[in-house]
Amino acid sequence: MQQIFSQLRAQQQIQDQIAQGASLQAVLDAICAYLEEQIPDALCSVMLLDPSEQTLNLIASVSLPAAYTQAMHHIPVAEGMGACGNTAWSKEATVVYDILTAPGWGKVRALAEENDLRACWSYPLISSEQALLGTFATYYRQPRRPSKTDIKRIARAAGLASLAIERHQDRARLRDYEARLAYFASHDRLTSLPNRAVLEDRLRHDFDLARRHQRLLSLMFIDLDGFKPINDSLGHQVGDAILTAAAERIQRVLQPSDTLSRFNADEFVLLLPNLEDEDQTQALAEQILHHLALPYLLEPEALHLTASIGIATNHDPAQDALELIQFADQAMTRAKQQGRNTFEWYTHDISERLNQRVSLRRELQEAIDAEKLELHYQPLVCAQTLEVISLEALLRWNHPDKGYISPADFIPLAEETGQIIPLSNWVIKQACLDSLDLEKQLHKLYPIAVNISPLQFRRSSFLDHLFASLEEFQRPTQALELELTEGILMDNPDTAIRLLKLLRLAGVKVAIDDFGTGFSSLSYLKRLPISKIKIDRSFVREVTHSSADAAIIQGVISMAHHMQLQVVAEGIEKPEQQAFLQQSGCDLLQGFLFARPMSKPALLEFLQTAKAVEKNFLEP
Ligand SMILES: Nc1nc2c(ncn2[C@@H]2O[C@H](COP(=O)(O)O[C@H]3[C@@H](O)[C@H](n4cnc5c(=O)[nH]c(N)nc54)O[C@@H]3COP(=O)(O)O)[C@@H](O)[C@H]2O)c(=O)[nH]1
């Protein structure tokens, strides 16, 4: 009875050890000692399975000779391979009555003999999911067969060993999983580079250190050029392969103290705390550009990609460490504007210009919302009679502090931000409204030409909006004319021609603006259902000094007339220019010489005072 109680106590202690997460070694040693107490002449050992090698390694024994335990490693799991190899292979107990005579012991037989081991019984260690974990063996110094009690005791000890190994493996898996989670919380999954959070930590640290030791800290913002179209057209797998390759190429030229981080999709930020001076920084940027521009050998063909780099250092007036990233990002944007595949240093004026753009954008939105924009009008006159034939609507922004801002300053910004759409819609409506008002007051219809932006023209709702506005203000289609630049038409000629045909069918005239500054293909022009071309004012400006410009203008007028197109010359400021264009047969003239763009009330007065108009027009 006493013996049973002490057995149960020992068993309970081992279970407690397992539950409390004691080391596997300690628990297995305790199990071996526990069984050796119950079977006094047994020498116990535990072998663990290495699933990748399919071999067994002895990991616990309290009484086996050291020479023997050291040799019991990498024992193959195979039929007849000693007692344990065979047990692991069959997942059933193996009893070797006498090692000296049993088959399949190979070199181990001599070792067993040297260490005076004659019998071995091996028992499989199986997990709760019936997977093999290892083997539990008892050795004896005499040939011996197990009794029923021996088998029961060994089975109980093996059960405890299996439980201990399984718990240990579960804990290891959990630790591994937690480590992986922690890794991915700080690293990018695709490239394994430190992520933004790690970068920001290191940047703060390096920034302080560099300040204390008065050293240079350089930071590069690297953005791959043209990555998005590749990713969109060739698929994300190709995109991922390029990002991984780019990260590797940059890493190849770095020192261990540098931090390369994946910041966003195709953006990397590189922190360089150990460069001597700006020259070294620049040399490194050049090296990185060179490596990134090498072909990416991906199936089925090689891809070519470049990068743009912005550089900022702690010598720039950053308020805090993180502002360096912003500075380098701004410099990178300028590198893109410089044509890509290049680097740019951050300078204070980049920031200023960006800040100005940000506030301009906000103020423009406020102006659109509050309808604080105005349309001014510039007359177009008949070249022969100087009578006003039509008007061009020109957008004006009357800024509360800065006064009138030229559309040349805010139209490109509005194009970039998409604000051009509400802006252009407003222009069309306002032009219709003003046309109605002018007609009511002057009893004459002056067609109004509006400038159409590329984004506006590409919108599928463009025509619908145009016709809806004409209808809303009961305007005939001749009330509006459209001015399009060549670039708009060249972007997507087929769609452009389809839209132009619809416009012609509806009776809306279209003029090509800034003619001569773009592609200007005459054969292409033949395909376009347009009514007018406007010769760009850069030709008009030089017409009296440059025989080449004079010849171009004459050629354009003659060619346009052959195609039954009207010709407008814009930017006429001098009587000599007027005279030349009249003599060359130009149809319509526009310029400060006749009238500057003016507000609607001023225009009304201008048109009403016909005599004054005539007086203002100087005959050559
Ligand atoms: N998408 C839209 N673009 C518009 C709109 N309104 C104007 N614009 C475009 O902005 C650019 C600048 O226009 P603006 O400052 O109004 O300049 C126009 C005239 O003032 C100027 N002009 C006219 N005569 C003369 C002259 O004798 N000398 C001289 N130096 N400048 C003169 O030319 C501009 C008109 O050019 P154009 O449009 O090519 O006929 C300009 O590109 C506008 O198109 C708008 O509502 N939407």
Image (tube, grey):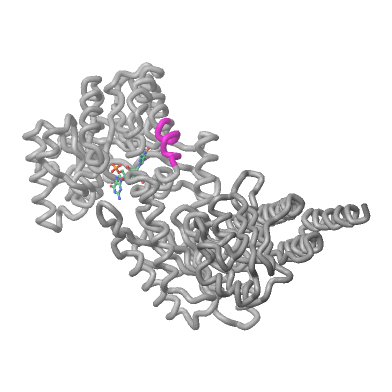
Q: Is residue 151 above or below residue 293?
A: above
Query: Looking at the image, which is closer to me, 385 or 526?
Result: 526
Please say whether residue 277 is visible from this viewpoint: yes
The part of the chain drawn in magenta is 418-425
Q: Whole-percent x and y of residue 554? A: 9, 45
Q: Does residue 539 lie above or below 598 as drawn?
A: below
Question: Who is closer to the viewer here, 443 or 354?
Answer: 354
Residue 128 vs residue 145, the one in the foreground: 145
Q: Where is residue 507, by image quadrant?
A: top left
- Residue 15, by quadrant, is bottom right
Seen at 37% across and 48% down, the residue is: 231
Please indicate whether residue 333 sits to the left or right of residue 74 in the image.
left
Residue 518 is covered by the magenta coloring: no
Q: What percent of the width, then of the height, locates residue 504?
A: 21, 24
- Determine the main secondary structure of the stretch shown in magenta: helix
Identified at 50% across, 63% down, the residue is: 269
Whether residue 420 appears in magenta in the rendering, the answer is yes
Image: 388 above or below 317 = above
Residue 578 placement (x, y as % from top left): 18, 45
